[in-house]
Amino acid sequence: MTERNTEDRTYDEMQSISLTSQHRSQEHFDNLNQLSVQALQNAIETANMVGKNALDSSNVTNKQTIAHRDLAMDRTWNTQHDQSTDFQEKTFQDAVRAELIIALKDIGVTE
């Protein structure tokens, strides 16, 4: 009867080792599965962000194109705008001329 108990105990120990090994293997598989799901979610999120940034960039470019088009059309049809631009340029030139005269007077080149 002792021999039978020894056989049972050996069988139980072997079965316990086998079950422990299966549990560890399952835990390892579950961890790998969790990591792969997380990596896939990160890749999808990154792709979504890249797509959103590309769309935002495209929208900005489209808005700039429309603004430039509108400005060109305005300058084509609105001649008053061109005259005001000329006035601003003339005013700027007059201001630079006045500053230049003051500077030349300071160094004694003109009276």
Image (cartoon, rainbow, N blue to C red):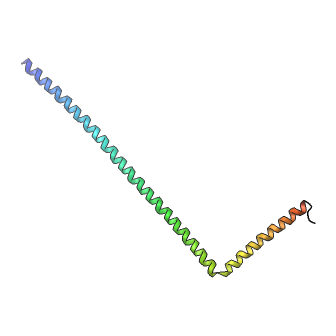
In the picture, residue 80 is in which quadrant? bottom right
Query: Which image quadrant: the N terminus?
Result: top left
User: Looking at the picture, how far across and down is residue 13, in whole percent?
Assistant: 17, 26
Q: Is residue 83 left or right of residue 8?
A: right
Q: Is residue 5 left or right of residue 104?
A: left
Residue at image position (31%, 42%) is: 32
In the picture, residue 70 is in which quadrant? bottom right
| 12 lies above or below 90 | above
Query: Which image quadrant: the C terminus?
Result: bottom right
| Camera-nearest residue between 48 and 86 | 86
Q: Residue furthest front?
A: 109
In the picture, residue 87 is in which quadrant? bottom right
User: Looking at the picture, how far across and down is residue 108, in whole percent?
Assistant: 92, 61
Q: Residue furthest top?
A: 2
| Camera-nearest residue between 71 and 7 | 71
Residue at image position (71%, 79%) is: 83
